[in-house]
Amino acid sequence: MPQTKPDKRFENHTGVIIGGLAYAVLAGAVLSALAARNGSTALWILVGVLIGCVALCGIGYSAWIFRYYRCPDCRCRLRPEPGPRSSPLRIRYHCQRCDIIWDSGITWGGE
Ligand SMILES: [Zn+2]
């Protein structure tokens, strides 16, 4: 039986994504307030572009983390475990070389 270990790096990744979203919402709110006061169309477009960019970066960043995951011990590139079909699905990576299952602590499909 491989042993299961939690990978703490995912907590940092989640923090970055949530922090980035919070920052985008804040910046969006400030720009929206400015745009509403000035009645400026250019600012509204800027708000849309900014939120769109942050959303794309967030999606790209999370996709990149899950796609290019490497074993913290041997640096092997790992693919997510298929896991059971039932939800919530827990994202885990099995390193055959170290015989360790790295648990991201992240679940798809909600609790
Ligand atoms: Zn490994």
Image: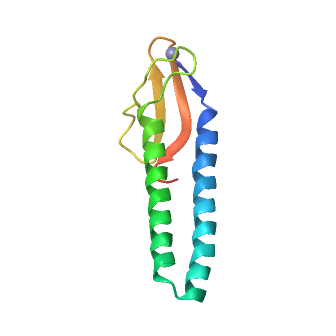
Q: Does residue 1 appear in this view?
A: no
Residue 45: horizontal and vertical position, in percent? 45, 74
Q: Where residue 2 sits in the image (x, y, percent)?
A: 51, 17
Of all residues shown, which one is farthest toward the top?
A: 97
**How many numbered circles does the render carry?**
0
The residue lying toward the viewer, choosing from 56 and 10, is: 56
Instruction: Point out residue 83 in the picture as x, y percentages from the top left corner.
Output: 39, 34
Which corner quadrant of the image does residue 11 belong to?
top right
Drawn side of residue 71 relative to residue 29, left or right:
left
| Residue placed most toward the observer, 74 or 44 | 44
Q: Is any part of residue 107 visible from this angle?
A: yes
The residue lying at 51 percent from left, 24 percent from top is 101
Q: Is residue 87 left or right of residue 102?
A: left
Colour setup of the view: rainbow
| Residue for point 59% across, 54% down | 20
Instruction: Indicate whether 68 appears above or below 75.
Output: below
Which residue corresponds to the image point at 46% horizontal and 58% vertical from the top-left? Answer: 53
Task: State the image coordinates of residue 60 (x, y, percent, origin top left).
Answer: 43, 46
